[in-house]
Structure formats: structure tokens, C-alpha cells
Amino acid sequence: MPITLIIADDHPLVLDGMENLFRTEKDFKLVARCHSGEEALTELRKHKPDILVLDVNMPGIGGLGVLQAIKKEKLATRVVLLTATMKEDELSDAVRLGARGLVLKDLAPKLLVQSIRKVHAGEIWLEKQTVSVALEKLLQRETGRNEAGLILTPRELEIVKQVVTGLGNAELGKKLFISEGTVKMHLHNIYQKLGVDSRTKLIRYAQEKKLV
């Protein structure tokens, strides 16, 4: 199955360049090109693509506004931001809103292609020269939480956090006002969903995904 894409930028030349680039990639399928945030949201709801390549600065609804709508509507499309420059506080907001990648417009086109494949595969992509170490860690943490949030219920996420603190089943049950048997049932479901088979592996998963 090809990676389905929507591209959004208010500059026609940028859209033309991306379209020509993606047409040469056999594993990409461009389903729409948009000139505004409003148009991007309309096409997202219609096509539900794998990836949205989104310009940050557009008239009307900008990139952050599009990200807010995607998060609010719980759309599954992953977003790669395309920008000439971006302040760290703006990038921090974008990360919290679920952006999975950031590509500078002046970088080689092959890096944009590479970033899309990485993000589609579930990874994150940040241009190192544009972000601090703290912001990179923030993105990793938010990405892990977003992934876990799609898999686990809020109660299961709370149990994972308590397990990481070292609480046993009985202690955990008392803290959450549920029986030890209910704790065991939740842990069984968590193990199945995350593909782990022990408390140790669950803790390692939580630490790797920055859930705590």
C-alpha cells in the first residue's frame, strides 16, 4: 500500500515542487494539494491520508490551528511540518499538539522524502539544528504518550504509571480503590495490548516511551 499524502502550503511554487518530487516516489500517493489551513482540514476529513505535509505559516488557519483541529477531532493523519523558520515556543506548541516531524524548507528534497517515510513508520523526525535537547525529549515523550493513549484506556495508563513507581498489586489496588483481582485483570490486558509479558518489560516500555 502506498503512503497517502496531502500537501498544504500557500505558495504555489512550493506545492508544485513537492508534487513533482512525490510523483517520482513509487511508494507515495498524493491525494490532494491545498493552499490554506481551511482547505487542508476539508481534504483531511475527506481523504484521511497517512501523512499531511503542512506549512506552518499560512493565512487564515495556520499550521498550529490545523494541528489543534486534528487533535480535537482525533484524526489519525500524522503531520510533518514544513517551515523556513520556527521559534522554539511555536515548535513546543506543535509538539504538544501532535506534530511528528519538522523539515526546513531550505534542506534537500530527499530529506523531506526520508522524513515522511520515518514518520509513517512511527518514528519522529526533527532537524537537529532547529531544536534544543530539551525540546527533542519533549517530542519523544509526547509521541510515546500519544501512541500509548491510542492503545490503553486512561485507567490502564494510570496503572502503568503506578507500576513504574514500584507499587505491588495489593498496594496499587488500595491506592486506586480497586481490588487486587481487578488490578491483575488490568495488567493482563495491558500486557496483551503492549506485547509484553512481565512487570520488568512493562516498566522498560514505559520508560522508553517516556510515559513517566
Image: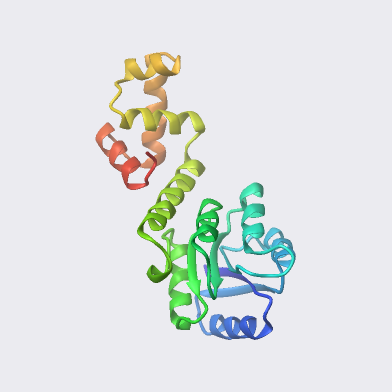
- Front-most of residues 67 and 27: 67
Q: Position of residue 104 (x, y in %)?
A: 49, 75
**170 lies left or right of 8:** left
In which image quadrant can residue 79 be found?
Answer: bottom right
Q: Is residue 69 above or below residue 16?
A: above
- Spot occupied by residue 210 in the image (x, y as percentages of width and height): 37, 45
The one nearer the camera, 184 or 6, is: 6
Left or right: where 66 falls relative to 205: right
Colour scheme shown: rainbow
From the top left corner, tell me how far across and down residue 82 is, in percent.
55, 71
User: Is 95 left or right of 181, judged from the image as shown?
Assistant: right
Residue at 70% across, 58% down: 45
> Which residue appears at 52% of the width and 85% of the height?
24
Q: Is residue 108 above or below residue 140?
A: below
Q: Is residue 182 above or below residue 142?
A: above
Residue at screen point 61% across, 50% down: 71
Q: Quadrant of residue 196?
A: top left
Q: Is residue 65 shown to the viewer in this render?
A: yes
Decide if residue 188 is in sight here: no
Above or below, 193 relative to 41? above
**Residue 7, position in %: x, y?**
62, 72
Q: Nearer the viewer, residue 167 or 76?
A: 167
Q: Residue at x 50, y 34 (%)?
A: 153
